[in-house]
Every structure is written in structure tokens, then in C-alpha cells.
Image (cartoon, grey):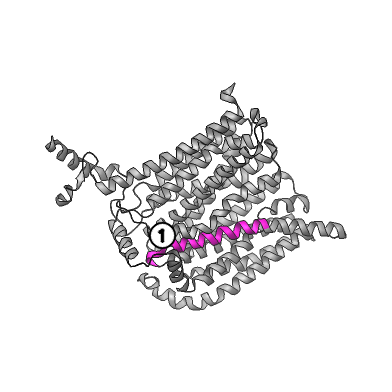
Amino acid sequence: MSDDDLTKVWPTGLTLPEAEEIHRHIIDGTRIFALVSLAAHLMAYMFTPWLK
Amino acid sequence: MSGMRQKAVLFLLQAGPRFLPFADAATPDLPLGRLLRLSLFQVSVGMALVLLVGTLNRVMIVELGVSAALVGVMISLPLIFAPFRALIGFRSDTHSSALGWRRVPFIWRGTMIQFGGLAMMPFSLLVLAGGGDSADAPAWIGQLGAGLAFLLVGAGLHMTQTVGLALATDLAPVESQPKVVGLMYVMLLAGMVFSALLFGWLLADFSPLRLVQVIQGAAVATIALNVVALWKQEPRTPLYGAAAAAASAKKQHSFAEAWGHFASGDRAIRRLIATGFGTMAFSMSDVLLEPYGGQILHMAVGTTTALTATLAIGGLFGFGLASRVLGRGADPFRMASYGALVGIPAYLALIASAPFDAPVLFGLGTAAVGFGAGLFGHGTLTATMNLAPKNQTGLALGAWGAVQASAAGLAVATGGIVYEAVAWFAAARGLDAATGYNVVFAIEIALLVAALLAMLPLLRRMPALAQVNPPTGAAVS
């Protein structure tokens, strides 16, 4: 295990490729949610313009 | 400073396994608690299915006044993704990941997509119905929004279920796969029944705000259930990534090639055809049972609702019996063919209940249909898991799911169309009002016979296989 430790980076204990993979998921997720929330807000506004 | 970093990394490495979503190791036996937790993804799938096919179907037509044709189109949109389940399964088989995960990224993505669809769905439905100020807006915005929401939820649930079943197959040793299949089916059914009751109760006092709360609550529940289901289930094996990379270097990797390999092995296509026929047979009259009870046998509304419960209880008994018998090493296709054999007299009983005016016979027939469907579904899924090639589990389960979901959707649509057409024709000719239903039931019997014929060659081979099966299991892959 201790040989492996050198490849793990601070502060997560993940290796660089592992960290990049998780980061890619986070970016993808953020993009999807940005689009979904944009569409949802647009339609919520059309239904009742900010609850007026 | 660097010493502190070293310490922090060491601490995380030691404490990590307790707090990180990785399984400690691939345990030879899957404990029941962990299995129950894994099966929670089926609850979220069942919830989404009920919401799409049951609750929103009614809410859109009755409460929101959307035209039935538009609702029909919206509800059938998720079906577009059913054939892609094989592709999703294949992609998860060959996923190369530094983290050493094949299934988790796909279940996570499926969960996210389902969440996204549910999050925007209530607003798109309200705009689709032209409520509030949205009446001034062009109609296509609501249609586009609702279509997108239904597509997202459908894509998400197909992805989650396909890869979730593949993960269950990875984790469960061959001898406990019948138990896993039984549990997966029961949890799907439980999720559907529980959320149907819950949604019905919550939406009884309907308002647009309540609709938003309920559907977005379902979105949050999806994430919660699936995260709990996934936590520490899949062990990290970076070898998957390496093996996948090596395979792609050898160009063994296109979907067509993988499919060709899968299709050439062990009568895979015949198994899929049998699954398709049987599933069509057992789902064609799903939405016709209640109207049949009401219109032909003059049952009260409460009694016809109990029919759906009867069907579900019959199904539970089927799953239970199949789990027990298959757990002792019986042949899953023999079980599936027993299911079809139970289905034939069951549909005959449904047809016979009208001339004899016997609601009891109809109830018994409905329970038997559920029981037969339970045996058939359990048998085909267990066989798919048992016979899945070791490195093509996702593809095998994806293909099964694609056939199963497409056949069910197609059958429900065809059943409705055939019933409408025959009923119209029968009314014009002054024939009995039950004719439309009877034609559908008769088609189902014919499909069951077709499924039995397709399964016959699979049965003859099985005894030899069953002898090899229990000790090694690798022999079947």
C-alpha cells in the first residue's frame, strides 16, 4: 500500500486520473443541471411570472 | 507542511473505506441487507413508472384537461429509449475508468437524468395545459418542455434499471441469482404499489403547487433511493479499465461485433424472441382488465381497482414460488414455460367469465394471469443472468430489458388499438360488447403458444446444463 501512496494527491488521497474522472462527472452534472434549471425557470415564469 | 500532507493522505486512506462509496471487496456471498439496499433502485424505477403511466396520465387528462391523444404521445416517449438498453449495457461492460467502476457511473448518470426530468416536469405540464399566464405563450413551448421531461425520465430510468440489474448480476453468485431476481421484481412492484397509493393520496386535493411539490419530491426521492442503493456496492477494480483499454486496442470493441458475439452464443436470439412473445402476451390486456370488469361484468369502481391489486398479488406469489424453486437449481426456462402454461387457461377463464356472468371466475383468472406473468418474468430474467457471458453481463441484461420493455409498450398500445377497432366493428354489426376484449385475450393466448414453441428447444438442452451449473457456474459463461 505504501508504494501506492506516492501517487495519491492531497487532500483526497485519490490519484490524478481518478480525481480528473470525478471532476469530469461534476462538470457534466453541472452542465445538465444548468440546462434543466434554465428550462424549468423559463416555464415557471411563463406559468406565473414570479408568483405575481 | 509536506509531512502534514502525508499524514492527511494516510489518514484518508485508512479512514476512507468507511466513508467512501466503494465496496471493501467483492464478497463471495452477498448478504441480504446489502442486497435489499441494492434493490432500492428498483423502487425508484417503479416510482417513475407509476408517475409516468399512471398518476400523470390521469392528472394530465382529468385535472389539467390536456387532450388524450397528446397525453398518449407523451407517455409513449420514454419507450423510444427501450431498445437502447442493449447499447447502454454494452457501454457499461466496456467502460474504462480510472476509478475502476463500470456500473456506478452509469447508474449515477441515469439517476441524474431521471432527477433532471422530474425536476422540470411539473412546470412543463402546467405550461402544456395552458394554465396560469401560460395561455398566452405559444403551444409548442409546453409541448417541447413536456416532451423533453418525459424523454429525460424515460432515458434515466432505462439506464438506471439496465445497469443496476447488471451490477446485481456481477455481485450475486450464480446460485443466489434467483433470489436476487425475485427481490428485484418484488421491490419494483412494491415501489409501484406504494408510490401509486402515496401519489393518489397526496394529489387527492389537487392544486398546481401540490403537483410541483409531489413531482419534485419524487425527484429528490429518486436521488436519495439510488444513492443509498449504490453506496459501497461495486468494488473498485482498476483492471476493468485496463482490460477494456487492451480490448479496445485489439479493436474487439464495436457494438456490432459485441452483439454478433453475444447473438451467436447459446441461442441468445431464441431466448430474446421467447421473452418478447411472452411479455407481449402478459401485458396486452393490462389496461383492459378494469374496463372489462366494469363494462361487461358490471363490477363497481372499487371492485375493479381491486383487480389491479389481485393481479399484483398473483404476481407476488409467482415471484415467491419461482425464487424458491429456482433457488434449488431448477431450470429457469422450464419455470418460464410453466408461467405461459398457467397463462393460457387464465385467459380462457377471462373469456369464459362473460357468458357465465361470473365475476369470481374473472377474479381468479386475473390472479392466475398475475401468477403466470410472475413465473414467466422471473424465469426469463434468471436465465438471462445465469447465461450472461462473463464480460457481457450488461449487454445481456440490456438486451433482455430492451426486448421486455419494448414488447410491453408495444403490446399495451396494440391491445388498445385492437380493442378499439374490434369494439367499433362489433358495435356496427350488433355483436356482443365483450367481442373486443375477447379478441385481445385470444391474441394473448396465441402469443403464449408462440412463446412456448420458441422455448421448447431451450428446454430440451437444459437438463444437461443444470447438471453442470451448480458446482461451477463458469461452465455456462
Residue of label 1? B169
Q: Could you say which is closer to the camera, residue B127 or residue B233? A: B127
Q: Could you say which is closer to the camera, residue B340 or residue A22? A: A22
Q: Is residue B187 magenta?
A: no
Secondary structure character of the magenta stretch overall: helix
| Location of residue B415 with respect to B328 vertically, above or below | above
Q: Is residue B401 visible?
A: yes
Q: Position of residue B88 (x, y in %)?
A: 46, 57
Q: As drawn, which residue projects farthest toward the top?
A: A52
Q: Which residues are magenta?
A: B388-413
Q: Amino acid at mark 1?
A: Thr
Looking at the rendered structure, the secondary structure element under dot 1 is helix
Q: Residue at x 70, y 54 (%)?
A: B288
Q: Residue at x 60, y 30 (%)?
A: A46
Q: Position of residue B159 (x, y in %)?
A: 47, 52
Q: Position of residue B73 (x, y in %)?
A: 65, 48
Query: Is residue B306 found left or right of B467 in the rendered image?
Result: right
Q: Is residue B348 visible?
A: no
The picture quadrant where one finds residue B353 is bottom right
- The N terminus of chain B lies in quadrant: top left
Q: Could you say which is closer to the camera, residue B401 or residue B462? A: B401
Q: Is residue B396 magenta?
A: yes
Q: Position of residue B365 (x, y in %)?
A: 67, 60
Q: Residue at x 64, y 37 (%)?
A: B128
